[in-house]
Image (spheres, rainbow, N blue to C red):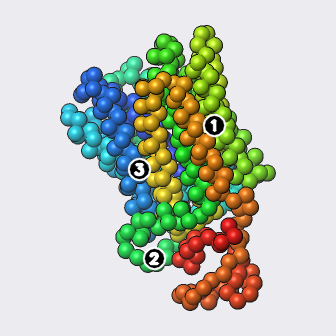
Amino acid sequence: MLDVLANRTYRHLFLAQVIALVGTGLATVALGLLAYDIAGANAGSVLGTALAIKMVAYVGVAPVVGAFANRLPRRAFLVAMDLIRAAVAVSLPFVNEIWQVYILIFVLQSASAAFTPTFQATIPDVLPEEKDYTRALSLSRLAYDMENLVSPMLAAALLTVMSFHGLFAGTVVGFLFSAALVMSVRLPQSQAVSRAGGIYAKTFRGMSIYLRTPRLRGLLALNLAAAAASSMVIVNTVVYVQSKLARPSTDVPITLAAFGFGSMLVALLLPRLLEKRPDRPAMLIGASIMALGLLAGVGVANLGGTFEWPALLLTWFGLGIGYSMTQTPGGRLLKRSAASADRPALFAAQFSLSHACWLITYPLAGQLGARFGMAVTFGAMAALTLLGLAIAWRAWPVADEDELAHEHRGDEPGLADHLKEGHSLDGQRHRHNFNIDELHDRWPRSH
């Protein structure tokens, strides 16, 4: 898997991602302490609002940026977003009002919503070979999982020698290093083509491509399944461990680590698996594992006694396996489903729609857990995961070929030259790698 790091451009981008993630993790810990410093007992409400602001920024900003990202110099754009995030991190220690926190969080998360899908859309152009790109996706999954494990431990160590305000300095350093690493390489620029329509059409172009592509409709349903499972872990771990099991706070990161280790294990093994197996069965199996894990959680929640915590650790480990198996190959589907010029918009659509799923499941997992207990919450999240699995199974064709035969009707500009591409059949029918674009506004009927 590490062979892909021999590519200097990707190596620098990957290091930029890792460093920025660690900086973001430190900011997450520091933000919680800042909220408590300002709001005291109301810190939970402040953080809940901050999380909602983050999701609103992710869902609303990403499609707008994705519409125009392929017209901007990628390197300059990514560096600018890093610098904006660094500037916000510099400002956070000096705020003393809740509303100031909310504004800065919105700016920070808007910059992240602009940076992340543009960064993700750049990697397929840096690593055009499918084998290399798959390894890069697995490394990215590992980076996210490692950040979840390393950042809290690093924050705890730093807090022994400095105040929480010092953690924001670590965040600033992380974003500045990320910007420097991006500046150190030349990035391929996607070919911008002229697009008809105004700002509305451009903003929703990625969404339009996404929702008219069967495999991506399946991916959206799997995003819902993954969001249901991961929300159960993220929202309810601390409540389960400390309230239901009455275990010390030090057991919370251990429980979360079980989920992370399951995800990391699959990220290490998945590239070899995907060399031999297509994406669809792997991702559907991953969603099935998550559903089974959540159903098992119903029994775990009713178990009681000494074995409940070990059983919970095993359940979280299984959910991590299913989550990584479902989420990691998603970039491969996006790469297959659009030309280079449309990838920023498509990755932005994925970023926005996947976070819209979390915007639904985060509060649902929290409210159900608080009102009805863990067993009911496990069952509800399992039902939501099964719903996503069933929709994906139906929406994503088994025979998901890249080359499709189709017929053109009309006389669009450039159609005559386009008909010479691929394999001619008869009349205005031909066969080639098929994506939704200006000349292909709908998926062939047989698919």
User: Which residue corresponds to mark 3?
Assistant: 58
Task: Mark 1 or mark 2: name the one nearer the start of the chain.
Answer: 2
Closer to us: 405 or 89: 405
User: Which residue corresponds to mark 1?
Assistant: 291
Q: Kindly state the secondary structure of the residue where label 3 is placed.
A: helix
Question: Is there CB contact under 8 Å for labels 3 and 2?
Answer: no
User: Which residue corresponds to mark 2?
Assistant: 195
Cα separation, mark 3 vs mark 2, equals 24 Å
Which of the labelled discs sits on residue 428, or is there none? none
Q: Kindly state the secondary structure of the residue where label 1 is placed.
A: helix
Cα separation, mark 3 vs mark 1, equals 26 Å
How would you rate the neighbour count of disc 1 (Cα within 10 Å): few for under 14, some for 14-19, many for 20 or more?
Answer: many
Cα separation, mark 1 vs mark 2, equals 42 Å
Quarter of the image for residue 337 reads: bottom right
Q: Residue at x 53, y 62 (%)?
A: 211
Whether residue 188 is visible to the viewer of this picture, yes or no, is: no
Closer to us: 24 or 277: 277
Which quadrant is the N terminus positioned in? top right
How would you rate the neighbour count of disc 2 (Cα within 10 Å): few for under 14, some for 14-19, many for 20 or more?
Answer: few
Q: Position of residue 240 (x, y in %)?
A: 50, 21
